Each structure stands twice: as structure tokens, then as C-alpha cells.
Amino acid sequence: MTRQSFHEGLKQLNYEILRMASLVVEAVDLSTQALLTGDRKLANSVIAGDDDINELSLWIEGQCLALQARQQPVAKDLRLLHVCLLVSLHLERIGDLAVNVAKIAKRMERTEGAEPYLELLRKMSAQALEVLRQGIKAFADRDAEVANKLEEIDEPIDEMFKEILGRLLHPSEEDQEVASSEWATHVALASRYIERIADQVVDMGGRVAFLVTGELDGKYFDRPLAPDIKNQFGE
Amino acid sequence: MAIIAIVLSLALFGLLVLLAVVLWRVANERERIAAMLGSSSGESLNDSISRLKLAAEAAASIPEIKSSLDQLVTNCPLPVLILDESLVITDLSPRAELELDQPRRRRGLLEGLESHELEDAARTAIATLEPAEIVVRLYAAGRRTYTAKLFPFQSGRKRMCLLFMQSAASTIEFGELRSQFAATVSHELRTPLAGIRAMVETLKHPGIEPDDRDRFLERIDQETNRLTQLVDDILFLSSLESGAANLEGSSELRQVIDALIEKLQPVATKFGVTVKNSIPEDLVIPLPERMASTVFSNLMENSIKYSGRKSHVEVIASKGDGKIKILVTDDGIGIDAEHLPHIFERFYRVDKSRSRRLGGTGLGLSIVKHVVESAGGEVKANSREGFGTELVVELPLKS
């Protein structure tokens, strides 16, 4: 494999990751729409579409391994292959979480007193979609600044998740009936999945920041690395 | 002599062979030149020269075409992008930069607009040189829906594609709104039905106390009344939307309000609210009596129920600028600014549980808005928390 075909391979890899990201954004959006509207057809389309995401993830994994084995890249190219592999795994996991949300959407019946919870889920979903878009943008633009801001825009999602759990665990008199129903379990799980989607993106942002800066020490890695390993990944 | 004859014959044969080779080479060269000029081997040189001239003229006009394309992109009021064969954005209109979250030149379409569906459609359009149209939801453009129109074309040896993006909000989002409305209606119908079912189950129990039985029967009565009212409201809204409702005619407003005060007196007494009619005697409004009664019954009932105890509701009117302005005012608790822009939306409730408890369908103010707007008027609400609310109806003054 020549150097030129190596770079063609990287270009193709980048393209397929962005394609996968576009499918994942759609899956997250449609699954949360299904959850909020109770549209089972939409939920089924998300579940069926997950195969395409998984297929792309496997292709990307194979391509990353093949390029590493054949070219034994160092410095930025090595970081790129390493991060592409991890980003695709994060995206694949987000796709699975969207499927979980879609499955809940199929089981969840609307109930009296649901509005405040649905409103919180609506806000959480919109914010999670924004975090996901920004995470993908950070990867596409190789922008460490945007990647490092993901944690900050994820915070309201954590707060809303805590609020939902708090209301269900310590319900007011008005919420008593809702909080003790099967519906409450579905809401707690759905909000947990949405919160996890955003967490996966924040972790993905850490990888992107590493891709750009080459800096492994810092908030995303607790233990400092041996200098020789650090040199291998550096500029 | 014989030897000389043999030598001459050989020389002549050699010359003939040489001539044949030269002629074959000339023919070959001619074909090669013709092929280079893009003509068939049978085409004359003159034809080839004419083709070359045409090609040169076309080449000369390319800057002109390019400049026209640049102008089109710069001045197009729609988001428009130009893509090359590898689906890289080579140029884009200012509108595209503004609306589509700033996609950049020399970046791929997938990176710029983040849609795999659009990417697939553009790839096929460029490969087949067939125009295409696709409806896509663009997350890069705030999750808006667009109709993407792709026009591939040949530019010299390269293929390019013009991509026009047109907002499809009006058609797609209407469909979404309709299904959302259907989901809300079924929820609104199901909630009281579930309550009625649960109470009937309890009533079946042989050991139920007479007091509890009376309480449940009273609740069932209330819920069925609310369901009947809800179905009536939905059917009325539907007749307004289909244009089947009769809006022709006029009515004397003071008489309408007097009749409504009498009808709503039990509700007003229950909430400790006083209602005053300050409409002048001869004021005629361009709505038939039934419609006027529907509009002001909803507005007044809303003020009575939600302004708070001991508040004062008053209906007043004025004329000016070719309009009749009718106000239903109260000095009650007011409406939070956050809720004010939404109170005329269907099923919007400021306090959901309170509204249901008081028997509201969530459609009253929406019906008011529909009737008033169908009659060419306008309805709005002004409020200040703690000071009261005024619901304003403006109708055109007919000569």
C-alpha cells in the first residue's frame, strides 16, 4: 500500500464516520419523537435502522485495523486511526441507546399527570440532540475547543435527569399516582438512556480533543502515560 | 537485357510497395487526427474543423457562463449550493450560509449539511445526470424540513450539480401538526373515560357506602358533561375549519351579553365574581347571534373561572379606525407572561389540573380565535400578574 492509497483510506474512513454520525443523529431524533408522541411506526423504523449503523461500525473497525497493520502509522495518523475506532464505537453505542428509547416508546401508554414529565423529556431530548450535533461537528472540524465545551452543554441534561428521578422517588401529592405506576419506570429508564447518549458524546469529545492536541494527560486520562508511549502518539 | 528488365521490374515493384506504405500511413494519420478532433473516421477534415471551431467558441463563452452562475448563486434568495463531482461544495449563496449553519466551501456535502439521504441523492444525480428532488430534515438547519432540488450538468469534462434548498415546512409540518392534534384529542377523550371506568368499577362493589356512591355518581355526571362539551367543541372547530359554519349576519351585542350574564350567573356566584355589561345600547357587531354568543361566552367564562375570587369582570366596547373593539376585562390574578402567547392554542392550559377540575375542554379560546379571524377580525390578550387581564376582540366595522 502506497502512501497515497493510505491517505485515500483515511479519507474514506472519515467519510464513513460522518455517514454513520448522520444515521445516528436521525436515530436519536426519531426515537425521542416516538417517545414523546407515542408513534410506534417511528419507533419501529429506528429499531430496523440500527442494522445499518452496526454494519458501518464493523466496516470502520475493520478499516482502522487494516490501515494500522499495513502502514504502522505514527504521530497524528496513529491518533486519527485510534480516535476513528473509538468514535465509531461511541456512535454505535448511541445507536443502541436510541433503540432502547424506541422500545420504551412502543410500550409507554400516555397517562394522566404525564405532561410535566413529557415536557422535561422533550427538553432533555432537544439538548441531547444538540450535544450530539456539536460532538460530530468537533470531530468533522477537528475542533478541540468545541470538543471541550461538550461537558458544559451536557450539564442541563444531567440536571433534568436528576429532576425526573427526584420527582418520581419523592412525589408530591399530585404526582403520587403517576410515580407508583409502570409508566414511571418507563420514564425513568428513557430519561436515563437520553442522559447516557449525551455522556457518550462527551466521552467522544475527549477523544477528539486528544486527536487535535496529542495530549493524553489531563482530565480525560487519570493516569499519566509512560514517556515512550507518549512519544509514539505525539506530533 | 533480361537482367535490366528484371532490375527495372523489381524497382517498380519496390516503388509500388513504398507508395502503398505511404498511402497506408497517410490514411492512418488522417484517422488519428480525425479521432483527436472527435470525429468519426468517415468525417471530412472540413467537418472536423467546424467542430473544433464550435468547441473553441463554447470554450470562449465559459467565463461568461461561469460569471452568470456566480451571479445566480450570489443573488438567489434561496439557499443554493454548487457541488463538484466528488460532492465537494464549490460555491454557495449567502442565504445558504445563513440558514444552513454555515456550511463551508471546499468541504464535503455530508460534512456541510449532515444528511446521508441528501448525499445519496446527489451522488445518484451526478452519476446519471438526471435531475432529482428529495425531502430531507436538516439538523444543520435547526431540524427544519427542506425540499432539495438537484440539477446535475456537464461542465467541460467535469460534472457539477446545482442544489436548491426550499423550506418544506408548510406542507410537512402541517401533517405533523395534524397527527399531533389527533394524538392530543385521543388523550383528552381517553382521560375522562378512564376516570369514568374506574368509578363504575368501584360502584359495582356491593359494600360501597351511600355517600361514596353519590360522590362517584356526581363525578361521573361531571365527566360525561365535559366529554359531551369536548365532542361538541371539536365538531364546532371542524365545521369552522371546513368553512361549513355560518358567519353571515349581525347581532346587537348588549342583548347578547345580557343573555350571557344570566346564563353564567350560577358560575359567577360559585366563584364570587361580579360581571358588568358596559356595552352601549345600539352597538351592532358583524357576527350572527349564535357566533357572538359562542365567542363572548367562552371569553367571559374564562375570565370568571380564572381571575380569582372576588374579582370584577366587565365587558366594554369602543369604535374607531374602522373597527369595533370589545374588551372582556378583569382585575384578577393575571396570566404569567410565559403563558400569554399560547392561551389561544388548542388544548393549551395555564394550570392543567385546575382547568380539568373546573370542566374546561381546552378548546374555548381556540374557538374564539377561529370565529373572530374567520370574520376578518383579530383577538389578543394583555395581562399583568396581580393586576388583571383584558381579552380583546377587534372586528371590522361594516358600513
Image (cartoon, rainbow, N blue to C red):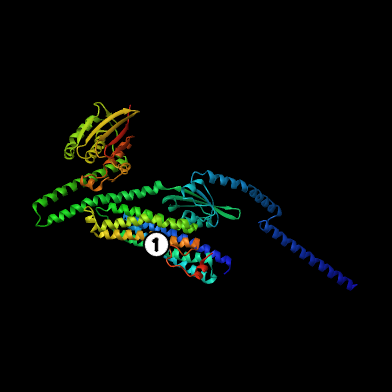
Q: Nearer the viewer, residue B109 or A229?
A: A229
Q: Amino acid at mark 1?
A: Ile
Task: Please state if A140 lies on the left or on the right of B44 as rendered.
Answer: left
Question: Quadrant where the C terminus of chain B lies?
Answer: top left
**Mark 1 = which residue?**
A94
Is residue B237 something one can see in this rendering? yes
Residue at 39% x, 49% y: name it. B172
Q: Residue at x 18, y 40 (%)?
A: B271
Depth order, front residue of B11/A71: A71
Residue A117 is left or right of residue A212, and the answer is left
Q: Nearer the viewer, residue B298 or B336?
A: B336
Query: Taking B82 as reference, is A235 above or below it?
Result: below
The answer to whether residue A171 is above or below residue B236 is below
Do we see residue B116 in this rendering? no
Residue at far bottom of view: B3
The image quarter containing residue A204 is: bottom left
